[in-house]
Image (cartoon, rainbow, N blue to C red):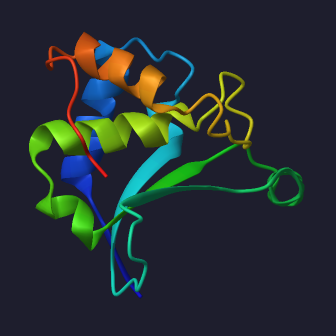
Amino acid sequence: MKYDYAPDLKERLVNIVNRLQMNHVDVNRVECLRSFGSSTKRTLARCHTIGKVMQKGMKTGAFYTIEFLEKFDKLNKSDQDKVIIHELLHIPKTFGGGFRQHDFVCEENIDKLHRSLGYPQKTTWF
């Protein structure tokens, strides 16, 4: 696997966080990477974090990295924004290093926020 920083995706993420008023997301403690060489068939992006024990041991707070697999770049902008929203929804309001599960990070919540960005009712992104 190869990883590269993705400043263009970080800029889009910051824009989405601001437009959707996701004020709990500390964009200074979120990084975006592109990965190359994954053999996964369906995954477009992944959200990673440092666990609580590691945070304590490192004397640091939560930090999230959103990894965008190479298939992500083949999507249109609307679908890419849905993926970014999906990954942002995994970050809990506490911004403590945990994750929100897929009972909250669901198509209904993603579509609602996607429409808030000015996109039409629904697009398929998976």
Residue 77 falls in image quadrant: top left
On the rendered image, what quadrant is the N terminus found in? Answer: bottom left
Q: To which quarter of the image does residue 75 belong? A: bottom left
Q: Is residue 92 left or right of residue 58?
A: left
Q: Compared to 101, does 121 lie above or below?
A: above
Residue 123 in the image, given as x and y percentages of width and height: 20, 34
**In x, y percent, where is residue 117?**
21, 17
Label count reads 0
Q: Residue at x 62, y 39 (%)?
A: 102
Q: Residue 7, position in %: x, y?
A: 24, 53
Residue drawn at x 46%, y 18% is 22
Quarter holding residue 119: top left
Q: Nearer the viewer, residue 78 or 94?
A: 78
Q: Residue at x 14, y 18 (%)?
A: 120
Q: Nearer the viewer, residue 111 or 62?
A: 111
On the image, the x and y values in percent for residue 29 come to 53, 42
Is 54 placed left or right of 94 in the picture?
Answer: right
The residue at the point 35 percent across, 18 percent down is 113
